[in-house]
Amino acid sequence: MTTADANDSLAWVRNRFSLPKGVIYLDANSLGPLPRSTAPRIATAVRQEWGDSLIGAWNDHDWINLPRRAARALGPLLGADSDDIAVADSTTVNLFKCLTAALRLRPDREVVVVEQDTFPTDAYVAAGVVDVLGRGHIVQRVPASDMADEISAAGARLAAVVLSHVDYRSGRRHDLAGVTAAAHAVGALTVWDLAHSAGVMPLHLERDGVDFAVGCGYKWLNGGPGAPSFLYVAQAHQEQFHPGLVGWMGHAEPFDFDSEYQPARGAARAMVGTPPILSLIGLIEGLASLDGVDLDTVRRKSVKLTESMMDLVDARLARYGFGLATPRDPECRGGQVSLVHPDAYAICQALIARGVIGDFRTPDILRFGLSPLFLRHSDIPAAIDVLHDIMATRAWDHPDFSTKAAVT
Ligand SMILES: *Cc1c(COP(=O)(O)O)cnc(C)c1O
C-alpha cells in the first residue's frame, strides 16, 4: 500500500460500494457505482413493500415521504435547508421549472445568458422556456471564460443566467459565489446546474446566495441509472415560484383532491407527479453512501487524485500527443480530468477493454471522473500504466475500437 493510501481517511468508504473485480472505475461523474445496500433495499421494496403491502405501502412504508427524506439527506451536501430542496423528475425538467420561474420573477428583462459550450440539454431547455413564455426573450450564448464581463455588459436587460458549476466536458469550474454576486449586482437571477459538483465537493447554496439550482442523482450521488434529480429554490423566491409545470404532488394537500391549486410550503411546490419510488429508494441509498463523510475531506482527496493524474500525464504521456482540457489551478476545476487527443474515442474503448473505465465526449475528449469515495490513490498510476501501454503498443489502433456505440 502506498503512503497516500495508508493515510487516506476516506479509505473505509470504498467498502460501501460493490465494484467489479479488476476494474478501475473512472466514470463516477457519468454513473456512480452501485452501493452495497442498494440491491437488497430495492429487493425488499419490491417484494415486501409493493408485493405484500400493495397500495398500503404509501402509508405503511412511508413512500409518500421519501422525497422529503431524500431532501433531508441532500441538505448538508448542498449547504441548504431541506425545505428549500425538492427531489423529483430529471435534471432537464427541473431546469425547465427553475428557469421559467426565474424569468417570471424578472418580467421587464429580456436577456437569458447561457454558456456557449454548455451541456446541450441546458441550452435546449432555455430555448424551450423562451418559446413557451412567448415574450420575446433573447438567449445569448456566452463563452464561460467571459461570464462575469458578459453579465455586467447585459446589465439591466439581463433576467437570468444558466450556468454549469463544473463543465461536463473540460471540468472547468466557475466561482459559484462570485458569478452569483455578479448577476445579483445587475439585478439578475442565477440558475446553477450542479450535475458535476454535488457530492464531490462542499456546496454552500444558501451562504452563496444562489437563487435556483438543479442537479443529478445518478452521477456523483450514486443514486442509480435515471435516479431522480433535485432542485433548490432560495427561500426568498418560494412564494413567487411559478414553474410553468404544476401538478397535484406540488399541492399543499394532494389528497384533498382540491379543484383549486394551493402550492405546498417551501420547495415542495416544485413537485409535479407521483414520485418513482424504486428509483427514489436507489437515490436514498446513494445519498447514504455519503453519510458521515466530510465533504471538505472529499474535496481535498479529489484535488490530490486529479493533480496526480495530471502530473502523470505530463510525465509519461506528453509524447503521445495528449493535451489537457482541465484547468491546473484546483480552484478552477471539479473532480474530473479531461484529456484532449484526436483518437480519444478509440483510446477510450481500448482502455475499457483493459478494465479502465472512463468515457469519451465528442469530438476529442477522454474524460476521467475520479471519485474520492472509492478510488485508491494507487488506482491513478495503475490506470496511467494501462494508458501508457495502450499508446506505446498502439493497441488502440484496431478496428474494434473505432466503431461508435449508441451511447458514448
Ligand atoms: C448529466 C447532465 C444533465 C442530465 O440531465 P438529465 O435530465 O438527467 O438527462 C444535465 N445537465 C448537465 C450539466 C449534465 O452533466
Image (tube, rainbow, N blue to C red):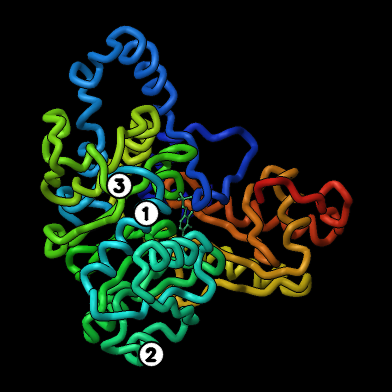
Whole-angstrom CA distance, mark 2 to mark 3, is 37 Å
Q: CA distance from mark 1 to mark 3?
A: 19 Å
User: From mark 1 to mark 2, how far is it between C-alphas?
Assistant: 26 Å
Task: Look at the image and tell me whether residue 264 can be seen.
Answer: no
**Marking on residue 240:** none
Pick the front one: 262 or 224: 262
Marking on residue 215: 1
Instruction: Identify the secondary structure beneath mark 1.
Output: strand
- Would residue 326 appear left or right of 261 to someone viewing this image? right
Q: Position of residue 335 (x, y in %)?
A: 46, 61
Residue nearest the observer in this picture, 390 or 149: 149
Q: Residue at x 26, y 39 (%)?
A: 70
Q: Is residue 199 above or below residue 131?
A: above
Q: Which of the 4 quarters of the picture holds residue 163?
A: bottom left
Q: Nearer the viewer, mark 1 or mark 3?
A: 1
Q: Residues within 10 Å of mark 3 (few under 14, many from 20)?
A: some
Could you tell which of marks 1 and 2 lies nearer the N-terminus?
2
Q: Of discs 2 and 3, which sits in the foreground? A: 2
**Sequence-wise first label, 1 or 3:** 1
What's the amino acid at mark 1?
Answer: Gly
- Amino acid type at mark 2: Asp
Q: Dot 3: what SS?
A: loop
Q: Dot 2, crowdedness within 10 Å: few (<14), some or many (≥20)? A: few
Residue occupying image coordinates x 41% and y 34%? 16
Say how many tags the image has.
3
> Where does label 2 land, which residue?
149
Q: Secondary structure at mark 2?
A: helix
Reading the image, the residue beneath label 3 is 293
Residue 38's place in the image compared with 377, above or below, is above
In the rendered structure, the answer to whether residue 402 lies left or right of residue 131 reads right
Q: Closer to the N terminus: mark 2 or mark 3?
A: 2
Task: Answer above or below: position of 354 versus 275.
Answer: below
